[in-house]
Image (cartoon, coloured by chain):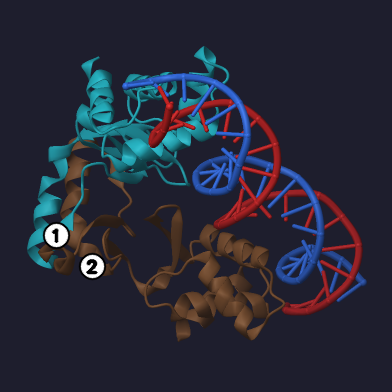
Chain colours: A cyan, B brown, C red, D blue
DNA sequence: GTATCTGCAAATCCTTTGCAAGTCA
DNA sequence: TGACTTGCAAAGGATTTGCAGATAC
């Protein structure tokens, strides 16, 4: 994955240091299929390096977030998932019954952005949106 | 506002008791222009009745939520707002710069629901959605 | 070498819970 | 009266912070 090196070089270029902790956290985010919570990143990292502290995870996520290298997505119920910025933008359909998460392409909601821009002059940030509802399976019940 | 009496009578009909605490909490939600957080409800209630405990606020909100009498809306950053169900459904455009909240009518996003239903067979719950972005003023800067 | 980063422990914030006392119907 | 509600205090979980020691560059 060049994505990790890419982010690492950006950190380095901006004067931040490349530490093993940061690299491991980046790997966790990168290897996650969709989005991953702080706790889950921590759980993965301590498998390889048990001395890592969860505060380091939070501090690293905060840094990456501020630099715009990762994105935060609000999954509801206080859960926040993280996602690398350079892995593409998409939206999430979250089933409130079975908790399934369906990823949909960014373009699916382009029309929403256009409507809001035209009607309210509001520039909506629709890069990583979570929508709740009922998925195909659960609708049948 | 009949809205409060309406909710109160529904509580009563379902076997729950009408207590001064519950009435005051209902008033706070009702008098709020848009949506109000648990903490803010508590702040308002203790002005009139300092002995009320915040756990009562949480318990009452939980009850009203379960009965579908109020709606929860995720305002991001872990903030949750409450809104009476019978005051109509709408969406919120939240400016990430100045934190302004613009309410828009539910119908503005009907097409989104239709698209998701057709393309993904996903029945999105778009009754109270919060979208983040830049408002008219802040776009000019 | 030195400014940055980390681990540790404690603090903080928001929310929930157990339980005895209070109160609505 | 009696079940439902409340206040209180304490617990809980997630996140943040202060600081001394460790480390990247």
Per the rendering, the mark at residue A116 is 1
Q: Dot 2: what SS? A: strand
Q: In the image shown, does B128 or B95 lie closer to the viewer?
A: B95
- Name which quarter of the figure residue B98 lies in: bottom left
Asked if marks 1 and 2 touch (Cβ < 8 Å), the reply is: yes
- Name which quarter of the figure residue B84 lies in: bottom left
Q: Dot 1: what SS? A: helix
Residue B93 to residue A34: above or below: below
Residue A123: x, y in percent? 15, 57
Say if labels 1 and 2 share a chain: no
Q: In the image shown, does A81 or B141 lie closer to the viewer?
A: B141
Residue B62: x, y in percent? 57, 59
**Horizontal arrangement in the rendering, residue A49 relative to residue B13 (left or right):** left
Q: In the image shown, does B77 or D7 lie closer to the viewer?
A: B77
Residue B131: x, y in percent? 27, 55
Per the rendering, the mark at residue A124 is none
Chain bearing tag 1 is: A
Residue B36: x, y in percent? 45, 69
Query: Mark 1 to mark 2: distance in Å?
Result: 10 Å
Residue at (35, 46) in percent of width and height: A132
Residue at (27, 69) in percent of width and height: B103
> Residue at label 2?
B104
Chain bearing tag 2 is: B
Q: Label 1 crowding class (10 Å Cα cut-off): few <14, some 14-19, many 20+?
A: some
**Horizontal arrangement in the rendering, residue A102 relative to residue D19 (left or right):** left
Q: Label 2 crowding class (10 Å Cα cut-off): few <14, some 14-19, many 20+?
A: some
Residue A88 to residue B90: above or below: above
Residue A117 to residue B100: above or below: above
């Amino acid at each position: 994955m060049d994505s990790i090196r890419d982010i690492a070089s950006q950190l380095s270029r901006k004067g931040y240091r490349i530490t093993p902790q940061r690299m491991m956290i980046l790997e966790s985010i990168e290897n996650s299929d969709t989005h991953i919570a702080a706790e889950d990143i921590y759980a993965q990292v301590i498998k390889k390096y048990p001395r890592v502290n969860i505060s380091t995870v939070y501090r690293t996520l905060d840094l990456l977030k501020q630099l715009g290298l990762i994105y935060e997505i609000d999954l509801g119920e206080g859960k926040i998932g993280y996602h690398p910025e350079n892995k593409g933008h998409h939206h999430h359909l979250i089933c409130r019954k079975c908790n399934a998460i369906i990823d949909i392409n960014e373009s699916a909601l382009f029309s929403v952005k256009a409507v809001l821009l035209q009607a309210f002059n509001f520039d909506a940030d629709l890069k990583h949106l979570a929508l709740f509802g009922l998925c195909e399976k659960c609708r049948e019940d």
